[in-house]
Amino acid sequence: MLLEIDQLVKRYHHKIVVDHLSLKIREGEIMGLLGPNGAGKTTTINMITGLTKIDQGSIKIFGQNLEKSGKAIKKGIGLVPQDIAIFDDLNAWENIAFFGGLYGLKGNRLKEKVQWALEFVGLKDHQKQFPKKFSGGMKRRLNIACAIVHQPKLIIMDEPTVGIDPQSRNHILESVRRLNREGSTILYTSHYMEEVDAISSKIAIMDQGRVMAQGTSDELKKMISSEDRILLTVSDASYSMMEKIKNLQGVIDCHGKGKEITILAKKDSALIGQISQIISNMGAEIHSLQVEKVTLESVFLTLTGKTLRDRE
Ligand SMILES: Nc1ncnc2c1ncn2[C@@H]1O[C@H](COP(=O)(O)OP(=O)(O)OP(=O)(O)O)[C@@H](O)[C@H]1O
C-alpha cells in the first residue's frame, strides 16, 4: 500500500471536520477524492503533507509512519495546492527551479528536471515569461510543474481545475494520466464528478469529514443500479408537489429548479404513473419526461442526500 490512512480525525474549535477517515491507495492508482465544498478534502490533504497536525489516527506513506519519518516521506510527495503558489517576480523557469531546489535538486540535474517539467506542462515556449502575463490555466500548469519537478512517487492535486478554461482543463487531465503512466500514484480531489469519473481508477466519496463509499466507478454505480433518475419538465412546479412525490414509496429524493423536477427512485414501472397522477391532480401538465441511467452524481446523491452542483 502506498498510502494508508487509518481513522484520521481533525477538529477545529470542537467541530469535527475530518471524522475517523480511512483510505488506502495502492501504488499506480489514481484515487479521486470527490466531495462538495467543505467536505474536508483540503484538511485531509494538509494532514497527509504534514501541513496540518493530526488530532487522532495515523498516516503511513511508502510504508513509513508520517509522524516518525515525515522529512524522508515529504521528498517523495508533490503537492499541487488549491490556491496557486508561485512567485510573480520569478519567471516560469526560475519558479520551477526554486521548488526543485527545495526538493534537493541542483546543478545539471536541476536544469534537466526543470526542462522536463516545462515540457511536461506545455510551457517551454514561455519559460522566460513572468506569471503576471499568464492566463489562469497557464498559472495552474506552472503550479503543477513546480510540484512535479522532482518526479515524486505520490502526487496530490487539490482541485487543480477550478476556474480555468476547458483547454487548460483538458491539458491538466491529460497530464494527470501521463504522470500516472510514467509511474506516479495520484490523489486527485475535485467536486466535479465528471472529471473524477474520467480519470480515476478508484473513487472515494467524501462528505462531512467522512468517506461515505469507495471503489471503482463501476462498483459505485452498481451499488445503486437498482435506481433511476427521472427528469421532468412541468407547466407549474411547487414545493408541495415535490413533497408529495418525495412521500411516494420508492422515491429517494426529489428536488426542483423552476419548472424542472429531478427524482431519484427505485426502479418501479408503477411509479411514473403515480408521479403523473400527483402532477395532474395539482392542475399541472408534464411537458417532458426522461429516465436516466445511474451516474456518479446519483450515487453521490444517494449517499449524501445532496447534489454536488447545488453546492458549487
Ligand atoms: N484552519 C481552520 N480553522 C477552522 N475551520 C477550518 C479550518 N480549515 C478548514 N476549516 C473548516 O473545515 C471544514 C472542511 O474544510 P476543507 O477546506 O477541508 O474542505 P474541502 O472539502 O477541501 O472544501 P473546499 O473545496 O471548499 O476546499 C470546513 O467547514 C472549513 O470551514
Image (cartoon, helix red, strand yellow):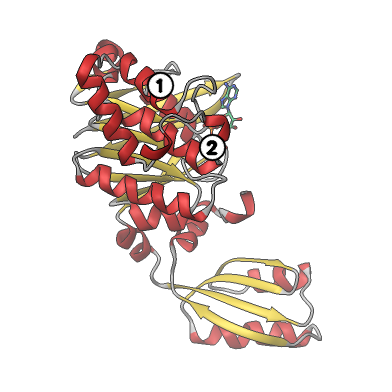
| Quadrant housing residue 118 | top left
- The amino acid type, in three-letter code, at marker 2 is Phe
Residue pictured at 81% horizontal, 86% vertical: 283
Sooner in the amino-acid sequence: mark 2 or mark 1:
1
Badge 1 element: helix
Ligand 1's image quarter is top right
Which amino acid is tagged 1? Glu
Q: Which residue is mark 2?
A: 134
Q: Which mark is residue 226?
A: none
Above or below for 81 versus 56: below
Q: Badge 1: few (under 14), some or many (20 or more) residues near its Cα, within 10 Å?
A: some
In the image, 38 versus 224, the foreground residue is 38
**With 109 as the anchor, is 81 left or right in this view?**
right
In the depicted view, which residue is nearer to us: 39 or 273?
39
Residue drawn at 79 percent across, 83 percent down: 282
Q: CA distance from mark 2 to mark 1?
A: 15 Å
Q: Residue 205 at x, y = what percent?
A: 42, 48
Q: Position of residue 123 (x, y in %)?
A: 39, 39
Residue 230, located in which quarter of the rendered image?
bottom right
| Residue 195 x/y as whole percent | 43, 54
Q: Which residue is mark 1?
A: 94
> Label 2 crowding class (10 Å Cα cut-off): few <14, some 14-19, many 20+?
some
Q: Is mark 2 within 8 Å of ligand 1?
A: no
Q: Residue at x 24, y 44 (%)?
A: 180
Residue 238 vs residue 261: left or right? right
Q: What residue is rendered at 24% in x and 30% in y?
A: 151
Q: Is residue 210 visible?
A: yes
Residue 29 visible? The answer is no
